[in-house]
Amino acid sequence: MGTSASKRVSRSFTDSNDFNSACDSVYEECLNLNQHAFPGVRPYQLSAAADRVHHSLSTTHPLIKKWVPTPPTRSQVDTAYRVVLTRRSGHEPDGEEEPCLGKGEFRAFGVEVFAGAVVANAGAAVIRRIPIGVAGIAGVGAVTRAGKDLVGTAIGLYALGIATSIYLSLGGG
């Protein structure tokens, strides 16, 4: 488990031909919609673009199919946009300019927004699943009058198993 979940997910998207193709296709659609008046995708187009990438991959890409049932929120889109701009300039944008994203930056934006959505939803799944199992194990332990060390160990192993299962599912396979 040497790689963080977000890096694992980002790498899965970066290495995916389907994901890159969907991003490139949506990028070209955005340029066509603004009639090539700008050298890239404008910030106001990003939310709709993320929706189109999601729609394109929601039935085929395993991570999006499992962890991103709805398109990314506007907040996730805005956060990903700021991250990409910060990588470009090395500092947070000042709000006066609204730079376009070129093809490579649009792909980086796609990776950022969808990796963020996958990791957020996977984290929520961990938070939902662990308390239910812990309550069940504690209940069985109380009924069977098992020792607290045994119950504590079982709870720890259960939590580790859930976290590991979700982490491994983030590989995209």
Image: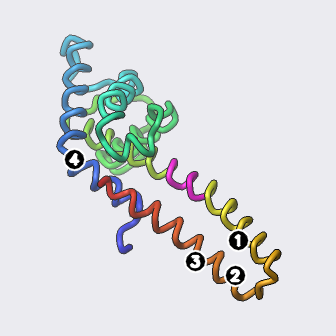
Q: Which residue carries the number 2 mark?
A: 152
Q: Earlier in the sequence, mark 1 or mark 2?
A: 1
Give whichever of discs 2 and 4 has the lower sequence position: 4
Tell me how far mark 4 sits from mark 1, CA to CA: 39 Å
Residue 123, can we see it?
yes
Judging by the rendered image, the residue that carries numbered circle 1 is 137
Which mark is first along the chain, 1 or 4? 4
Provide the secondary structure element on which disc 4 rests: loop
Label 4: how many Cα within 10 Å (few below 14, some 14–19, many 20+): some
The residue lying at 54 percent from left, 55 percent from top is 123
Where is residue 2? Give x, y as percent.
36, 74
Q: Residue at x 70, y 81 (%)?
A: 152
Instruction: Reply above or below: 9 against 70.
Output: below
CA gap, disc 3 to disc 1? 11 Å
Residue 80 position (above or below residue 135): above
- Of residue 25 and residue 107, the one placed in the foreground of this image is 25
> Which residue lies under the disc numbered 3?
157
- Res. 16 mark: 4
